[in-house]
Amino acid sequence: MGCVESTTTASKMRIFTWRANIESDLAGYNLYHEKEFIANIPDPSAIRFKILVNELREGINIFNMTAYDLSGNESGFSGDAIYTYESIIKQ
């Protein structure tokens, strides 16, 4: 399972896509920002997820995913999906 990020028009709105895990007992995926859990994707056939990430910090942000099975076992973290966030403040 690889994690790849794509951009949307809103700066804190993120869309993640990944290669599906092919394990027969796959139950879903978890999404992490800076190793902190931020979302559960309970659909094992999902390969795309859209989320508003309010916790983005200025500069580099790292996202990872894990897969989990029907017994609750969770995989290790995917490779890093890196996003650089720069807030725009109008004066």
Image (tube, rainbow, N blue to C red):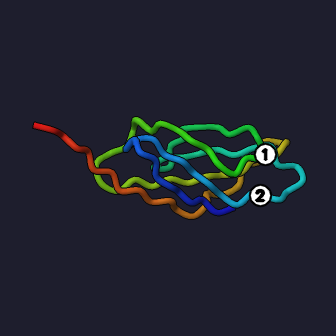
Instruction: In the displayed orientation, state which residue is furthest to the left.
Output: 91
Circle 1 SS class: loop
Give how far across and how far down residue 36 sits, in percent: 50, 43
User: Does residue 90 sit above or below 73 in this rendering?
Assistant: above
Give how far across and how far down residue 48 sits, in percent: 65, 48
Q: Quadrant of the C terminus?
A: top left
Picture disc at residue 44: 1
The three-letter code of the residue at mark 1 reads: Pro
Instruction: In the displayed orientation, state which residue is furthest to the right.
Output: 24
Please state which of residues 58 and 12 is positioned toward the viewer in this rendering: 12
Q: Are marks 1 and 2 in contact (CB under 8 Å)?
A: yes
Q: Which residue is mark 2?
A: 21
Question: Which residue is located at x 66 percent, y 52 percent?
Answer: 66
Q: Quadrant of the N terminus?
A: bottom right
User: Does residue 50 sit above or below 23 in this rendering?
Assistant: above
The three-letter code of the residue at mark 2 reads: Asn
Question: Which residue is located at x 64 percent, y 63 percent?
Answer: 2
- Categorize mark 2 by other alpha carbons within 10 Å: few (<14), some (14-19), many (20+): many
Give how far across and how far down residue 75 sits, in percent: 71, 55
Picture disc at residue 86: none
Please state which of residues 55 and 36 is positioned toward the viewer in this rendering: 55
Circle 2 SS class: loop
